[in-house]
Structures are given as C-alpha cells and as structure tokens.
Image (spheres, grey):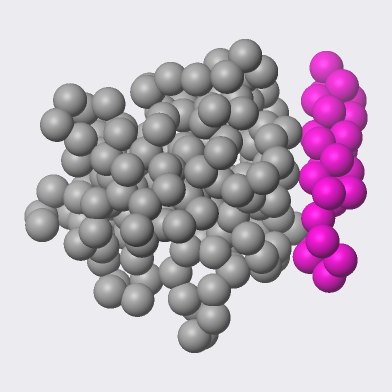
Amino acid sequence: MFASMLRGALCLSLAVTATLPAGARTLLDYTGECVPFARTASGVQIYGDAWTWWDQAKGKYERGHVPKVGAVLAMAKSERLRLGHVAVVSRIVDKRVLMVTHANWSRIGGTRGQVEQDVTLFDVSPDNDWTQVKVWYRDSDGLGGSIYPAHGFIYGDKPVAELSGKSPDYVGSLIDAYAR
C-alpha cells in the first residue's frame, strides 16, 4: 500500500515538474500569468484568456457555485479585470470565505506574476453564490475594496498538493472577510 502511494506521489510530482517553466523547482516558484498556473495546479486543460474559461468548460468539465478544494474560480471580464482571472481553491474556511492559490494578482517586490498561496477570498454576492467576490490584496495589506464578478467554479480532477500551506491563517482570513 505504501509503495503504491509513493509511486502515485512521485508520478504527480513528475507530472507537475514536467509542466513547470524552466527554472521553477516547484509550482510555487512559478512566475507568469494566472492561466498557465491555474491549468497546471488544477488539471483543468483550458487555454485562452481567463474570462473565456467558464464558457469553454461547458460540456468538458463540471461547473457550479459551490467551492471545492482544487476547483478553479473563473472570474469574469470587468473594467478592472480586462482579461478576467482564474484562481485555484486551496482551502475552504467558512461558507463565504475560502483561500485560493493563484498567480499574477498582487505586486510582490514591485512586480506582478508571482504565486500567492492561501489568499483570502470572500463571497459578497447577494445570493451567496460566489458570483461577486473580494480578494485579499498584498498592496493594501488586507481584503481589497473592489468587488469582482465571477462566473463560478470549474471542477478538475487532479489538484496539486502544494496548493495550501502547512499553517494557513484561518483567523486572519475570517477577520479580513468579516471585519470590514
């Protein structure tokens, strides 16, 4: 049993490593756009701008409005998100609070593109269906003030183990979400 589990973990590790850009040792070392990161992290094999993922997933992947670890949240095109955004669910904290791991959101060291792990995301939609969200933003050191439209979740079948850290800040996530 242990040998089988070890082989499975090794295969997953090799599959992830094979899809990483040159120079990245792990998925968390990736630097670039959100789309290639989400594709590698979730196993959802969709290409093109993030705002197109929801429609492209129809008939290929299950879609819905309930967060699940490893699912891709497809954010819609908007004035602030001209190409949309995709992020992978890393933890579910509360019925309206979750954590995502994603690339190319906050500026880190003055530049975009890096991966952020276990970032707070809060459902602010009137119907509690994750169609409007607020996202933690490093530059403001807290939950951003902007509300972003989202289509929903695309459910893949092979999330990567690295999505969530060993000690995510659940309390901080809840404070970020509910204290504002």
Q: Nearer the viewer, residue 60 or 79?
A: 79
- Residue 104 vs residue 169: left or right? right
Quadrant placement of the N terminus: top right
| Above or below, 42 relative to 33 | above
Boundaries of the magenta span: 1-25
Q: How many marks?
A: 0
Is residue 101 in sight in this rendering?
no
The quarter of the picture where the C terminus appears is bottom left
Residue pushed farthest left?
179
Residue 5: tell me if it is visible: yes
Residue at left 83%, top 28%? Answer: 8
Position of residue 23 in the picture relative to residue 173 (left or right): right
- Identify which residue is drawn at 51% across, 84% down: 109
Up the image or down, 45 lies above or below 173; here it is: above
Residue 31 placement (x, y as % from top left): 67, 67
Assess whether residue 4 is covered by the magenta stretch.
Answer: yes
167 or 23, nearer to the observer: 23
| Residue 7 horizontal/vertical position (percent) | 89, 30
Q: Quadrant of residue 141?
A: bottom left
Residue that appears at 81% across and 36% down: 12
Q: Residue at x 56, y 59 (%)?
A: 103
